[in-house]
Image (cartoon, rainbow, N blue to C red):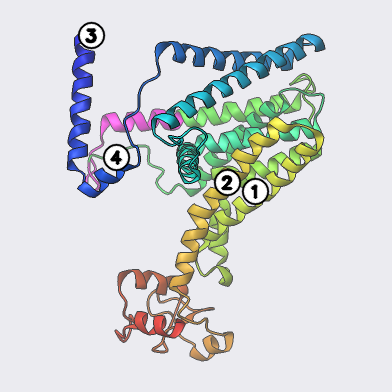
Amino acid sequence: MGVAKRVALRLYTAWQRRQQVAALPPILVQAAVSSGWRQRRPYPPKSRLCLIGVTLLVVLLLPWASLVSVQLTAHLLAGVGLVAALTASVLGLFKCLAEMDDHNILGGVRGEVSGSKWLVFIRRVLLRARCRFLSFESLYMKRKNFSILVNQLVFFSICERLLLTNQRLSSLYTLMFFNVAAYCVSYIKELVEREDWSMYINIARNSNVRHLALSTTKIVLEWTKAITFIITVVFMLLVFGLEKGLKNYSPTNGYLTITGIYFISTEKVFVDMFTLWLDNRKFDCFESMENFYCPAILISFQILLSSFITFLCIFTGNLRLAILCSFTNIRVKYRELSDGYIQPLQNELEALAGYRVATRSEVKDHDDVCAICLTPMTCARITPCQHFFHADCLRRCLKESNKCPICQYNILITSILRHS
């Protein structure tokens, strides 16, 4: 980018910021000016180079120090990295104090320090760091498949350190075999659940004219998946059948059991199968909310298992893996459990809290089907107008209307008054 383009870009950015400030209410502008707000200044070239150099020095020397075989050299490199980190921290502290002096956070009189302004500054720094951390955490959670893969890899690595001390890369081999098995299971599940076995695609739903391009693409894809599945199964049988299929890979039964249970509880195909099984069983305690209960149960199990493994890892001295597991397998999973399943489940239960659960004798004496889904009832909720409905049917009706589906009585207001 040329000099003229840079100058034009900076002028446009400054003009846009002035327009944004001018659009603010006068109260907000006055509050921002009184709090010492100003635009950020870019780092000077020298300080930027120093910061990059110190960062590279710390990042490169500390791992090298952990891998060097000579103990004296390792201690020397670790000391250099520690001194560099302390120097960078001191320079950052002096720069922070200088910025505080520019903002008049430090007192104008020598030796005078304003405690409230110190607290305001520290609070701003902590809030900014917390916002950055939460934004990174949210971005990591949005990458669902990547986060699951990282969770499995970290858990398998910790189990390898604890149970397979003399075998390197066993966690990668195990994770690869489990993923291959999950692919085979998902392909078989797709074949079992398929209803349309036609290899051709018509140009319209009510037409018998075949679409040549789409039909050819579908045939090629189906045969490719079938051949890939057959080759995968054959190679797995060869690897497990030969005694020397994988050199130096001999996992114990305990390692395979623990990692297999964790993999099954995290892999999407097995989670969907478990949810479908619970949905078909129709347990009365879940009240047709298996989509909330099933992931909550599985994630709680993952957190408990990861916490136990992390505790053992701390006890044995593997602090780096313990810290990594505490973030990826405990902290992130707990936030996913709380925000994604516990809170929506509580909202759904609060919507049904004003309608009491019918006893078995009441359901038996009622001896009728649900008026919404027209299926027999083994458990039900009773409305203030004394009508029986399935909990899931009533919950869905309340999202559309506040009235009883039978008598059009306003059941929401009455239930709120009774519950309060």
> Given this view, does label 4 or label 2 mark the residue nearer the observer?
4
Residue at the bottom extreme of this rendering = 365
Q: Are marks 1 and 2 in contact (CB under 8 Å)?
A: yes
**Can you give x and y, in whole percent of width and height, for residue 5 in the image?**
20, 13
The residue lying toward the viewer, choosing from 177 and 199, is: 177
Look at the numbered disc 2 and give the secondary structure of its residue.
Answer: helix
Comes first in the chain, label 1 or label 2: 1
Q: Are marks 2 and 3 in contact (CB under 8 Å)?
A: no
Please say if 38 is above or below 188: above
Q: Is residue 146 magenta?
A: no
- Label disc, if present, on residue 3 of the rendered structure: 3
- Label disc, if present, on residue 303 of the rendered structure: 1
Marks 1 and 3, how far apart in space? 54 Å
The quadrant in which the C terminus is found is bottom left
The quadrant in which the N terminus is found is top left
Amino acid marked by disc 3? Val
Q: Quadrant of residue 281?
A: bottom right
Residue at (77%, 9%) from the top-left corner? 73
Please say if 43 is above or below 140: above
**Can you give x and y, in whole percent of width and height, for residue 299 in the image?**
60, 50
Residue beneath disc 2: 333
